[in-house]
Amino acid sequence: MPQSVDLSVKSSTPPARQNPGAACEECRRRKVRCDRQQPSCGLCLSSGVPCQVTTPRPPRGPKRGYLKALQARIATLEGSLLQQQQQQQQQQQQQQQQQQQHNDNTDTITIAPEDTTIEGLTFNDHPPLTWDFPITTDDGSTLHDLCQGTAPGTTSGTSSLDGGSVHASTSPIQGFQTPSDGVGFADAMLDRKMSGISDGLDGINISNLMQADLDQLYFDRVHSFAPVLHQRRYSSWTRSIAKTEAQSCLRYAMWTLAASVSAHYQNIGDSLYSYTRRALESLDSKCIGLGITEMEQVQAWLLLAIHEFMCVDFSRGWVSAGRAFRLIQLNWLQYSDGPDVRLPQTDWVDAEQKRRTFWLAYCLDRFISVRNNSPITFSEQNPLNQNTIRLPAPEIDFQNEQPTLTGFLSEAITARDAIVTSTFTECIVVATVIGRALSHRQQSTVDNIYLNESRDFWERHEWINGILTQRMDVFSLNYPIAAQEADPMLLFISMMWRTTVLYMYQLMKSVLHLTDEKRSFLAECTIQSTTAAKEIVGLTNKLSQMNSFKVHPLTPIPLSLCAEFFVSYHELGDTYSKQLQDITEAMRGLMNFSNLGSGLGAYAR
């Protein structure tokens, strides 16, 4: 008799793709996959940082029915705008006549509607700008002709309103909760003047939603390499009607820089830049004779200088940066902590913002000076730079308003333990070391003029080279190569470390009298510099995998120094031509987003 066969199949649960739970804050910050191990994930365990997991998180996406309601409102608004188009044209003509009559009796600057310069920004002659995504209504119609501007050819990335209109109305849609101080270029705070310049620009309207989008673009794409602003403090004073002129200039400078890293807002970037520069120059003229300069004025000049390096002209950016440097020197006590500082301060966040403002100027001073071989403004020989201003606090503590007592620069440079610091602090350290290399080169030039012995040169050179090797090892321990390649700020710092190695090698090769006892040291440095150059090429290849708008704006500096190294010392290897080609192609790719590479050509040594 045949035996019965059991055809039942045991149910089995397929293995989960990853461990349950949320990713830790460190992995989210580095944008890497978290293995969700407890009590510490693998990355935090290897990096030696606390593994913190924030369980409660706000739900994603809009509420149910929100999109349909929004589509209905937009459709209604579209119909209203189309019906009122003729009425608006008539009203504009009437307003122009009234404005002309008003300007005849007042000292307000006249901005002609038909002019397309900063004196009259209308953009009325360009084709309509379409949205990245279709918004259809129940009858099949689409949202169009709501705004006018120059349609860019590419999208900008993660911004929700990156295709905003320069003609969007400042009136909020019914049902939206928007700030009450919506800064429209046409109608915001007309009663205030900035040396004859109103707080808004006639002819361009920036809605509250566009303001929020530009702010978010700044903190998403700019704040990582210029972390000087406290986001909640900024949001607080922007909602205040009683903003100072310096704060208004800072906000426009932020929007200018945010527009330069957004494809859809680049059509108003030049207008924002021209207005911001005029406002800052007007503010400077009003500060003559005053003993104190507001911090926001310095921050605005620094951000404007970065924009000019990227999009305008190297020389103009260097002059604007110099203005910020001098304003800091004129108000040195505002940025100084002192060696006996205590945590209970009147306003720790405000003091931290001033520290970060100084250190941003400090880094910008050294990175640009090493490219064009100019004297450093914030000299390290001044003991006040190292002993009275503490290093910036970690970004999380800064944004969460958690007072943190940090050390001084001299302590960070001489530290031998692999303590994880913030990326901003790492940037300050590498700027300090390459600044020492620059001062070493300039001092050796003076020694050669006066025919001094080269003993001091080799003592300085070996001292700086020892610090360079030690700090590079600490940086590699704190940040693995995978983390460096994923974070634009860490990638830039890594390239600058290796660029410093090339810079030191070029300086050593320039010595005329190379003694026999230094031949072995030269051979060791040759191997070190060749390895550093190859690693820069490897890091350069990772740039193409990043969002171009998130690449550090000063990245052309290490690339240009590396290219100069390959051209000058091609005898070090047979593969230099291929590596030089990779560097050149990377610099050409960055020229689509930054003019800094072409501006540095005039300063090649």
Image (tube, rainbow, N blue to C red):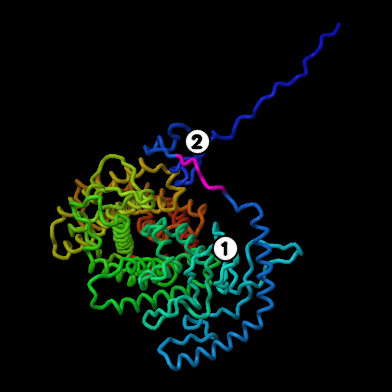
Q: How far from the left and from the top, in percent, is residue 400? A: 38, 50
**Left-right relation of 119 to 339:** right
Q: Quadrant of the N terminus?
A: top right
What secondary structure is found at the residue carrying circle 2? loop
Name the magenta segment's main secondary structure: loop
Q: How many C-alpha atoms fall within 10 Å of the one at disc 2: few (<14), some, or many (≥20)?
A: some
* Lower sequence index among marks 1 and 2: 2
What secondary structure is found at the residue carrying circle 1? loop
User: In this rendering, does residue 257 appear at all?
Assistant: yes
Specify whether residue 55 is painted magenta: yes
Amino acid at dot 2: Asp
In the rendered view, tell whether residue 51 sits above or below residue 62. Answer: above
Q: Does the CB distance between marks 1 and 2 fall below 8 Å?
A: no
**Left-right relation of 70 to 369:** right
**Left-right relation of 277 to 326:** right
Read off the residue under disc 2.
35
Q: Residue at x 43, y 76 (%)?
A: 199
Magenta highlight range: 53-59
Q: Residue at x 75, y 64 (%)?
A: 140
**For residue 147, which numbered disc appears in the image?**
none
- 66 or 280, nearer to the observer: 66
Read off the residue under disc 1.
176
- 250 or 369, nearer to the observer: 250
Q: How far from the left and from the top, in percent, is residue 592? A: 50, 65
User: In this rendering, does residue 600 appear at all?
Assistant: no
- Residue at far right of view: 1
Amino acid at dot 1: Phe
Specify whether residue 360 is painted magenta: no
**Left-right relation of 163 to 2:** left
Quadrant housing residue 150: bottom right
Q: How far from the left and from the top, in percent, is residue 259? A: 49, 67
